[in-house]
Image (tube, rainbow, N blue to C red):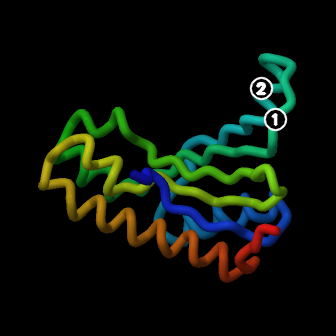
């Protein structure tokens, strides 16, 4: 079972991160945190790691709607979107699948929120793909 939705991009890493942030903003998401895994692992462990960023995305109206139905939903927020360079050097943009994430709560009243977030994430991934083009792996 897949728990993410993703696209592979033909672009420069930092440019793809910027475009992902912009596409999230266009869909009503703010990025509450931006974690640079590569820098963190280098600083904390002295380890080298691929380019990898975690963007903690939140759409306040949808978060409010979900939290109003299920108070414990906050343990699953924000919705993470990751941008990383895979072993082949291709940039991947991957978002948590909101329907899988919300499914953990086992509350049918959250289905509409999950569907709305999923549709918005699909548009985010499409916008980034449209800007740079899909990558093909050799």
Q: Nearer the viewer, residue 88 or 28?
A: 88
Marks 1 and 2: which is nearer the front?
1
From the viewer's perspective, is residue 32 above or below residue 89? above
Direction from residue 66 to residue 7 in the image, left or right: right
Direction from residue 67 to residue 40 in the image, left or right: right
Residue 17's tag is none
- Label 1 close to label 2 by CB (< 8 Å): yes
Q: Residue at x 72, y 35 (%)?
A: 37
Residue marked by disc 1: 49
Residue 14 seen in the current view: no
Q: Dividing the picture into quarters, in which one does residue 50 lie? A: top right
From the viewer's perspective, is residue 40 above or below residue 31? above
- Give percent across and percent down for residue 45: 80, 17
- Give percent across and percent down for residue 105: 22, 41
Q: Residue at x 37, y 63 (%)?
A: 117
Residue marked by disc 2: 41
For numbered disc 2, what is the local secondary structure? helix
Q: Residue at x 50, y 75 (%)?
A: 123
Q: Nearer the viewer, residue 21 or 98?
A: 98
From the viewer's perspective, is residue 119 above or below residue 98? below
**Residue at the outermost left position:** 108
Q: Residue at x 24, y 54 (%)?
A: 65
Residue 89 seen in the current view: yes
Q: Nearer the viewer, residue 118 or 4?
A: 4
Q: Quadrant of the C terminus?
A: bottom right
- Give percent across and percent down for residue 59: 42, 57
For numbered disc 1, what is the local secondary structure? loop
Mark 1 and mark 2 lie on one chain; the one further toward the N terminus is 2
Q: Dividing the picture into quarters, in which one does residue 49 lie? A: top right
- Give percent across and percent down for residue 88: 82, 56
């Amino acid at each position: 079972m897949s728990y993410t939705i993703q696209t592979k991009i033909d672009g420069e890493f930092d440019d793809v991160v910027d475009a992902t942030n912009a596409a999230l903003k266009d869909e009503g998401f703010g990025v509450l945190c931006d974690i640079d895994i590569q820098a963190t692992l280098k600083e904390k462990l002295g380890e080298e790691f691929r380019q990898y960023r975690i963007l903690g995305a939140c759409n306040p109206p949808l978060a409010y709607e979900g939290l109003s139905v299920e108070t414990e939903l906050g343990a699953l927020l924000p919705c993470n979107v990751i941008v990383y360079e895979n072993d082949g050097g291709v940039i991947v943009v991957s978002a948590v699948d909101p329907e899988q994430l919300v499914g953990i709560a086992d509350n049918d009243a959250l289905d509409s929120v999950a569907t709305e977030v999923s549709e918005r994430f699909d548009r985010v991934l499409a916008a980034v793909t449209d800007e740079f083009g899909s990558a093909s792996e050799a």
